[in-house]
Image (cartoon, rainbow, N blue to C red):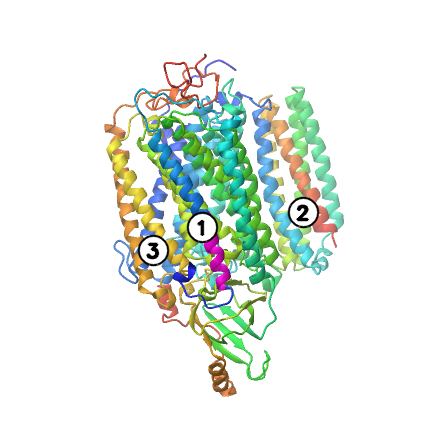
């Protein structure tokens, strides 16, 4: 079917709420994710205030009681991973970029795509509804270990626990539908001429993330059914007194939970690859090697899960195996980071805001990466497990992923999404106002963690060693830095909405990028391409010798 | 976008595999890990609890065997429906699909009788480890049978009008998958002592 | 390195501290090197008029060696880290040295309770000493502990000993420690266990042989022992249930 399908412009309600257009669905995911990020960020503000200034009235919230504290940290973790990182990194960027970057008019299954968002929205509403029920939202940590999560008498939030579980399960369904759609679309709907190694890395990474998600989430879906029955039908799947096993949940959870880290990491790495290539005017150093290391990481991510359970009561011999696999996964990840750094060599680096974010991602993520070695080594993990050291470690990975890389992507594709440029000065203020405080938040937490501060505790008053004033100063420093970082996000929000109307008009290709999405008008019309493109080369042809222009778009015949 | 105006993305086939078949395989793959997780949990518990064999002996092996036979026969109908669809004989494919879902109905009816008897004998979901897994596994499978039947009837309605014949193959693939899950469940729940 | 931040009070605390130091030196080297190279490249190859970019695929041999050589060096460093890490783990978690004493540690929402052998030196006899929130041990004595939980998953953590082990309902998990410094140290629960998680504190008191013997004599009186029996539901820790729920 090579004839042009005419795409009619639908009415407002249909256009923005019941649309099957991939770009609108991407915006729905993006704005829902941003709204959830505000909620998750507010929770971080509240419980950091409690830790920085114990037992004081928190402006805008009130006194933080132990029960509320537990609910806040649980919801912060769940929301930031399931309702911010995943919808923004995978669903928003995936939906917006995949059809544009592979040169077709929409997803292969637009109505499944719409259903995916609707289920996702429902899951977010179910989660938020748990704030209104008796007992309040679930407070048993985002890992929801039974028997605490299974028995209402233990967690004191029986309704909240069930709503949390249902919300998470619905979210999984939404991303299964979305991920299958991404994978099928990328496999089958590419523009003529676009071979496997002509696909931009960000598309590869989002699809691989979706595949990893699909392959790892199944057992946890099964686990969620079992836990739901334990909560509501008085079964005993995880109850040791009735033949069940609480460790089973931990295995099912982390069999998913660890690959999930890479599910959100890969799209971030993909975004950074696109940005680095464009602003360094360089071909990615070893495009294929990047992909091979990604496959290696994807595979290894399935055999490291028990490093979350070294001291959980598993057979101690198992820890040795998982310690080895965990250090092994550092090899491909390190290699990928080296490749990104090597891409800078010989380039012509323009430090526009998107590039600042992308470089900050690499610089900060390395800190997150190397501190993981302390935790992956079973010996040191005995001490560091469930301390603030691990909190600081995974925030040094997750903040680069879910905040820094997302800003790299948003500032980079904003002109394509909305047809206007963001303000560059505000962009740089926002960048420095985010990255500097970010380090001031989490470096002190590495130290409090090494000094023995345990996680998920609303007050250290009961612990003499943790009540030393020096540690409290560090906690307060961290909290103040968080306040600074949060207030600088207002600069971004202002820039985002102000530029929608007042930004400089972007034109089709403001960054002089070689991939297909920049060949269509900004914002792209319904149906994307006036004439569907044919692809002649890979996505990163910059600085080709002997040419006047320093880049060669994928769709231009030689 | 109405159902008739498919995006061009849906009509391309860079891999050479039709898009409808490709997505069916991915759906089946993601279902395999769900059932795989549940089955692996069950097997691990079962190995650790030899006493569950007592509970398992209450299941009706003959009913299970009959149901296996019913599902296998219905899968044969699904294969014939696919063949008819390949020969562009929509009405025949529709007839065979309806026959397939009749197989599903018989399966669920037998299951209903079995469960009624189990419950009357006092074996419910919370009666112990084996019964929890028994009802959860078979229940999840039963839901897949039910979903397959409903989708199959919708596909049959289109096929009767010679529309969307590629879907006949896809629902057939899905039905075989549901069938294979049962092939695993039957020995593990009914026969293993 | 770790001891700068928290006292080390058991024999294996130093093993973990040395392992931490080893990792810190190795990964610190790589981190500083990689960051330095990155910042140098950003500076050296900043956009300048009239300087074209180089076309490098990163797929030829003399280019890939810049990745391959570090790649093997990283594997080497991983080996240098993993071997002692497993040795530390093996000696702490996998093999238990012969015990001088055995104590029972029981976690429940939200208190630690302890059962120690009385003067007769055997557990589960009439003169056992049961305490809530306080464990008295002798310095330079190898202890085995039997860890269990009455309700949910807890985690028995003594930071000064570098000791951490989850307590699972329905199981008894064995472990060991050998205190080597007299003093009072914190016991934490490091696994989310409900509303009173932050109140689930305890103290471990490491005493000299003489002090411990004196303490034993004072407490092995059956009347005292009975008084110290753990309450059915411990909500100790300053706040009442109603206050915590609020």
The residue at 33%/55% (across/down) is: A48
Which chain is mark 2 on?
Answer: B
Label 3, on which residue? A47
Helix, strand, or loop for circle 3? helix
- Determine the chain carrying the residue at label 1: C
Q: Is residue C50 above or below residue C67?
A: above
Residue A474, percent across and down? 32, 57
Residue A37 in sight from this viewpoint: yes
Query: Does dot 1 land on a helix, a strand or a loop?
Result: helix
The CA span between labels 2 and 1 is 64 Å
* Distance between mark 3 and mark 2 Cα atoms: 51 Å
Where does the image place residue A200, in percent across and percent down from the top left?
Answer: 46, 27
Query: Residue A26: x percent and y percent?
Result: 40, 32
Q: Chain of mark 3?
A: A
How many other residues sit within 10 Å of disc 1, few (<14), some (14-19) or many (≥20)? few
Q: Is residue A75 above or below residue A84?
A: below
Identify the secondary structure beneath mark 2.
helix
Pointer 2: what residue? Answer: B111
User: Does residue A469 appear to the left or right of A532 in the view shown?
Assistant: left
**Mark 2 crowdedness (10 Å alpha carbons): few <14, some 14-19, many ≥20:** some
Residue A302, quarter of picture: top right
Q: Which mark is residue A352?
A: none
Task: Decide whether the magenta segment is chiefly helix, strand or loop.
Answer: helix
Identify the residue shown where x is 39% and y is 14%. Answer: A547
Query: Residue at the top extreme?
Result: A558
Tell whether A63 sits left or right of A557: left
Q: Nearer the viewer, mark 3 or mark 1?
A: 1
Query: Which label is found at residue C25?
Result: 1
Read off the magenta span: C13-26
């Amino acid at each position: 079917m090579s004839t042009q399908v005419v795409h009619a412009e639908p009415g407002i309600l249909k256009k923005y709420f019941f649309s099957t257009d991939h770009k609108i669905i991407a915006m729905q995911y993006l704005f829902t994710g941003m709204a959830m990020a505000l909620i998750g960020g507010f929770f971080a503000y509240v419980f950091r205030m409690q830790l920085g200034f114990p037992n004081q009235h928190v402006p805008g919230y009130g006194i933080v009681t132990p029960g509320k504290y537990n609910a806040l940290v649980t919801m912060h973790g769940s929301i930031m991973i399931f309702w911010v990182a995943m919808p923004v990194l995978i669903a928003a960027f995936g939906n917006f970029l995949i059809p544009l970057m592979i040169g077709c008019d929409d997803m292969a299954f637009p109505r499944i795509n719409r259903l995916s968002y609707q289920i996702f929205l429902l899951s977010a509403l179910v989660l938020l509804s748990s704030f209104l029920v008796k007992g309040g939202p679930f407070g048993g940590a985002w890992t929801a270990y039974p028997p605490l999560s299974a028995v209402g008498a233990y967690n004191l939030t029986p309704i909240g626990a069930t709503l949390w579980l249902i919300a998470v399960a619905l979210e999984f369904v939404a991303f299964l539908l979305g991920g299958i759609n991404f994978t099928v679309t990328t496999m089958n709907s590419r523009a003529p001429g676009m071979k496997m190694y002509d696909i931009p890395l960000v598309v590869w990474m989002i699809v691989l993330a979706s595949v990893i998600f699909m392959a790892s989430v199944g057992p946890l879906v099964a686990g969620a059914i079992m836990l739901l029955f334990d909560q509501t039908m008085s079964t005993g799947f995880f109850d040791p007194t009735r033949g069940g096993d609480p460790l089973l949940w931990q295995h099912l959870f982390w069999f998913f939970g660890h690959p999930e880290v890479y599910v959100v990491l890969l799209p971030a790495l993909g975004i950074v690859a696109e940005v680095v290539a464009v602003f360094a005017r360089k071909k990615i150093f070893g495009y294929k090697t990047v992909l091979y290391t990604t496959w290696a990481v994807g595979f290894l991510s399935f055999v490291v899960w028990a490093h979350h359970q070294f001291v959980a009561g598993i057979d101690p011999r198992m820890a040795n195996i998982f310690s080895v696999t965990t250090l092994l996964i550092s090899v491909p990840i390190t290699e990928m980071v080296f490749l990104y750094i090597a891409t800078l060599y010989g380039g012509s680096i323009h430090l526009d805001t998107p590039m600042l974010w992308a470089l900050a991602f690499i610089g900060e993520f390395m800190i997150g990466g190397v501190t993981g070695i302390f935790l992956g080594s079973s010996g040191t993990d005995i001490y560091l497990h469930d301390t603030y050291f691990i909190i600081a470690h995974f925030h040094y990975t997750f903040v680069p992923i879910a905040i820094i890389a997302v800003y790299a992507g948003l500032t980079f594709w904003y002109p394509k999404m909305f047809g206007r440029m963001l303000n560059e000065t505000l962009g740089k203020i926002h960048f420095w106002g985010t990255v500097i405080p970010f380090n001031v938040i989490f470096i002190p937490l590495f130290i409090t963690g090494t000094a023995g501060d345990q996680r998920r505790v609303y007050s250290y008053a009961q612990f003499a060693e943790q009540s030393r004033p020096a540690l409290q100063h560090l906690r307060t420093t961290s909290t103040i830095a968080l306040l600074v970082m949060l207030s600088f996000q207002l600069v971004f929000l202002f820039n985002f909405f102000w530029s929608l109307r007042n930004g400089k008009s972007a034109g089709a290709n403001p960054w002089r990028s070689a991939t297909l999405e920049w060949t269509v008008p900004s914002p792209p019309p319904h149906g994307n391409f006036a004439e569907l493109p044919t692809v002649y080369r890979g996505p990163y042809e910059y600085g080709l010798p002997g040419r006047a222009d320093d880049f060669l778009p994928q769709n231009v015949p030689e | 976008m109405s159902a008739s105006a498919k995006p061009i993305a849906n009509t391309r086939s860079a891999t050479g595999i039709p898009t409808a078949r490709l997505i069916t395989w991915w759906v089946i793959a993601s279902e395999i890990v769900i059932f795989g997780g549940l089955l692996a949990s069950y097997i691990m518990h079962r190995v650790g609890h030899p006493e569950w064999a007592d509970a398992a002996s209450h299941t009706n092996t003959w009913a299970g065997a009959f149901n296996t036979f019913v599902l296998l026969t219905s899968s044969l109908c699904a294969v014939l429906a696919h063949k008819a669809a390949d020969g562009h004989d929509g009405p025949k494919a529709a007839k065979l699909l309806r026959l397939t879902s009749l197989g599903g109905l018989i399966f669920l009816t037998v299951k209903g009788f079995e469960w009624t008897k189990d419950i009357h004998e006092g074996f419910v979901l919370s009666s112990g480890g084996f019964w929890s897994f028994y009802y959860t596994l078979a229940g999840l499978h039963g839901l897949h049978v039910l979903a397959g039947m409903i989708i199959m009837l919708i596909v049959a309605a289109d096929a009767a009008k010679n529309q969307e014949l590629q879907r006949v193959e896809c629902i057939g693939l899905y039905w075989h998958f549901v069938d294979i899950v049962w092939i695993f469940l039957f020995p593990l729940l009914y026969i293993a002592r | 390195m770790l001891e700068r931040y928290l006292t080390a009070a058991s024999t294996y605390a130093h093993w973990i501290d040395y392992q931490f130091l080893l990792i810190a030196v190795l990964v610190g080297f790589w981190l500083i090197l990689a960051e330095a190279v990155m910042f140098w490249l950003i500076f050296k190859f900043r956009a300048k008029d009239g300087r074209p970019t180089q076309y490098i695929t990163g797929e030829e041999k003399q280019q890939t060696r810049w990745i391959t050589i570090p790649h093997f060096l990283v594997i080497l460093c991983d080996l240098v880290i993993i071997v002692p890490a497993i040795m530390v783990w093996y000696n702490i978690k996998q093999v238990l040295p012969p015990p001088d004493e055995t104590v029972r540690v029981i976690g429940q929402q939200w208190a630690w309770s302890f059962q120690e052998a009385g003067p007769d030196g055997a557990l589960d006899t009439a003169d056992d000493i049961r305490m809530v929130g306080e464990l008295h041990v002798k310095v330079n004595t190898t202890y085995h502990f039997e860890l269990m939980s009455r309700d949910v998953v807890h985690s028995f953590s003594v930071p000064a000993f570098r000791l951490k082990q989850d307590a699972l309902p329905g199981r008894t998990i064995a472990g060991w420690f050998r205190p080597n410094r007299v003093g009072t140290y914190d016991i934490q629960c490091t696994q989310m266990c409900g509303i009173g998680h932050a109140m689930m504190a305890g103290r471990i008191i490491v005493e000299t042989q003489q002090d411990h013997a004196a303490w034993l004599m004072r407490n092995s009186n059956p009347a005292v022992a009975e008084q110290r029996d753990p309450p059915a539901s411990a909500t100790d820790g300053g706040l009442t249930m109603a206050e915590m729920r609020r």
